[in-house]
Image (tube, helix red, strand yellow):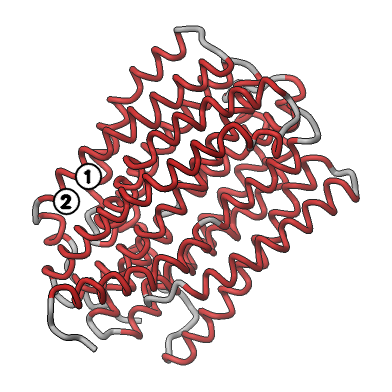
Amino acid sequence: MNTGTPAAKNRSLGQQILALALPALGALIAEPLFLLADAAIVGHLGVNQLAGVGLASTVLQTAVGLMVFLAYSTTGTVARFLGGNRLREAVAAGRDGIALAILLGAGLSAAGILLAPWIASVLGAEGEVHQYAVDYLRWSMPGLTAMLVVLAATGVLRGLQDTRTPLVIAVAGFSINIALNFLLVYGFSLSVTGAALGTSISQWGMAAAYLVMVARMARREGVSLRPTGAGIRAGVHVGSWLMLRTASLRAAVLAAVVVATAQGPVSLAAHQLVMTFFTFLAFALDALAIAAQAMIGKELGAGNRTMARDLTRKMSAWGVGFGVITGVLLALAAPFVGWIFTPDPGVQQALTAGLWVLAAAQPVCGLVFVLDGVLIGAGDAKYLALTGVLNLLAYLPLLWWVHVSGLEGGSGIAWLWAAFGLGYMAARAVTLSLRARGDAWMITGSAPVLRKD
């Protein structure tokens, strides 16, 4: 019962956030869990295998990260249509987003198979590390298309305020992935190829489940399954600024990989593991951002800016609080998790140092992820893109200092992650906070224009 008091209103708002954020948590961490599983399984094959998979995983994360606008733009667009009581148009927008994902995925997968050796060489891999990176990349490429379909379809359900269904699909996909990887890597002795193949099969299973669901939804609403050129072009237009925003983030990640590679296989292996933890925690904290995208998109589509402002304040506070909690837990676990992934003492020591720095950066990360979701849900992609470039320019000198210092091992990884976690992420926190304090981002989050299917 709503008593009308501020306390009751706040409880109601918190319950709405949690209803979306908690199920979103499980779905968001599916891909990092895939990579963690691969790292744990491959890590016991040897340092070179782990380093090669680490290099290849960074490339895959970059590709998926650049295409994440398929989920983000679809979530905001569908949510704003839903807020305006235009469900048929919301489904049509989702259908066109999935079609765009298939087109982009097919092109990227083909390019990845052909260019895998060149990509590994550009990132500094040599010898056995190079070969393992190429093997993992090539056998992961079929699954890349599936992951883009999953991104777009997940965005449809998020926009419709449904984060529970993606959770079910993510849990099923992760469970199958673990079983397949053990079977193919150890049962069939396929080494890193088996880990990549098992992940690709699992990803296609997830994509198939989403395609069936969206097709049923389209038939129920009387929406044709044939995508429209106008809808696909609209997705490209909305996503172009988000792609630039993501490109700056992935450039920051790739630059860190280049520095870690120059420090040697031990540092590269440790950096890959720290980055996997960062990605895992980023998606966990990003559960609030997903709730922000869906809820703020819906409220702005309905013209309710006051509620959008209230949501932003509450979720920002939650983001910092959750960052503190995850940071404390990570700091406590850091000295003990290395053995899970590798028996090499050098990698374990460097991993501990990197995780301690990452733990210190978690409150800042929590604020960044939430505000990023707020502005994406509002459609404020241009600001995110332009400030993303500025943040990257502020970060690169810090990274260059780490490179020329000649540090390696635990010290090298600690300073590398200080540059990324306490330098780059802090710059992002400043630019996002400045924008959120004003009203311009809410003006950009107007309802989408009417479209015809």
Give coordinates of residue 328: x percent, y percent. 44, 41
Tell me the residue at 43%/86% (across/down): 223
**In front: 36, or 225?**
36
- The amino acid sitting under disc 2 is Ala
Front residue of 41/72: it is 41
> 29 or 325, which is in the foreground?
325
- Residue at 11%, 61% in the rendered image: 443
Disc 2, disc 1: CB below 8 Å? yes
Amino acid type of the residue that numbered disc 1 sits on in the rendered structure: Leu
Give the residue at mark 1: 432
List the single residue furthest toward the right.
188
How many residues crowd mark 1 within 10 Å: few (<14), some (14–19), many (20+)? many
Q: In this picture, is 121 found above or below 101? A: above
Report, in whole angstroms, how far the alpha carbon at label 2 lies from the one at label 1: 6 Å
Q: Position of residue 287 (x, y in %)?
A: 41, 59
Q: Which numbered marker is on residue 436?
A: 2
